[in-house]
Image (cartoon, rainbow, N blue to C red):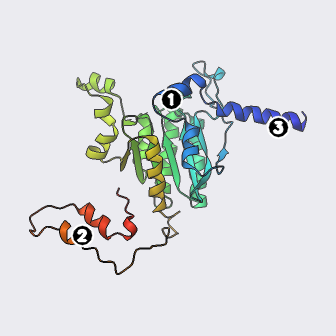
Amino acid sequence: MSIERKILELANKREQAHEGGGAARIEKQHAQGKYTARERLQKILDEGSFEELDAFVTHRCTDFCMEGNRPLGDGIITGHGTIGGRLVFVFSQDFTIFGGSLSKAYAEKICKVMDLAVKAGAPIIGLNDSGGARIQEGVDALAGYADIFLKNVKASGQVPQLSLILGPCAGGAVYSPAITDFVMMTRGSSYMFLTGPKVVEQVTREKVSTEQLGGADIHASRSGVTHLVADDEDQAFEMLKALLSFMPQNHRERTPIVECTDPADRVDPSLNFILPDSPSMPYDMGEVIRTVIDDNDFFEV
């Protein structure tokens, strides 16, 4: 085969990998107010910085007629890029391919990028949109989750691990995000639960909605699993970038230092009016923090 044909074949495979689950499923994703896995990476990473890894990997399952359905990438996009010039490693789950469900090959791609992040001393960012384990692969898929959990634990305290929940994540898909450093969710379109409302109703006879069971607000106000809630994906991406700007690359480096224009001897008389005269009267501590903080640059978690 000539070099020209090899290059053309490579370009065709790359184009095929970029198609995800097809136009119809991508359109459905957009109709739900969600970006595709690749669009999300374009939103969070510096333009032109993304380098994809293992784009042509496919699953190895031969049961349940799966041997004839092997989409390139297997529903997970992994690689590295930069955010504000800083190196980060990322994985983005593609719900348009098998509902983002995890296979053994899928898990291996995530584990590889996590290993590279620890080796390079750079943050790991996971964009989660997955229905859980790929049932056709049985225990192999569950073993893949165990491998990911082990990587999470080993990376803990070495590099920042940030998780964005951007769709209905169930079962094994929620364990890993829950043990990362920070979790963000989008209101009305992202959910985290071990089993869905129908299973809960069958077992407990209690009817609950997806929002009541695992919505963003319930995890922010009751369970404490999520740290930040965004109104939509665009806001979530901005929150991610802001949070990352306060964090070091790894445990060996200091947090980023930015130039401060706020005078060290600044006096703000408004504090006299925020704090009440009576010690038994309530007041907004957030307002106090925003008043005294340098350049009013405060990011609440």
Q: Is residue 194 shown to the viewer in this render?
A: yes
Residue at 77% across / 36% down in the picture? 10
Q: Quadrant of residue 193?
A: top left
Furthest-front residue in view?
269
Amino acid tagged 1:
Gln
Q: Residues within 10 Å of mark 3 (few under 14, many from 20)?
A: few
- Tell me the residue that label 3 is attached to: 7
Q: Are marks 2 and 1 in contact (CB under 8 Å)?
A: no
Q: CA distance from mark 2 to mark 1?
A: 48 Å
Percent coordinates x, y for residue 269 in the rendering:
24, 73
Amino acid tagged 2:
Ser
Disc number for residue 285: none
Amino acid tagged 3:
Ile
**Mark nearer the N terminus (2 vs 1):** 1
**Mark nearer the N terminus (1 vs 3):** 3
* Relative vertical location of residue 293 with respect to residue 161 in this rendering, above or below: below
Q: Quadrant of the C terminus?
A: bottom left
Q: CA distance from mark 1 to mark 3?
A: 32 Å
* Of labels 2 and 1, the one closer to you: 2
Percent coordinates x, y for residue 31 in the rendering:
48, 27
Q: Secondary structure at mark 2?
A: loop
Q: Residues within 10 Å of mark 1 (few under 14, many from 20)?
A: some
Residue at 37% across / 79% down in the picture? 264
Q: Quadrant of residue 106?
A: top right
Q: Secondary structure at mark 1?
A: helix
- Tell me the residue that label 2 is attached to: 270
- Is residue 240 rendered to the left or right of residue 272? right
Q: Are marks 3 and 2 in contact (CB under 8 Å)?
A: no
Disc number for residue 29: 1
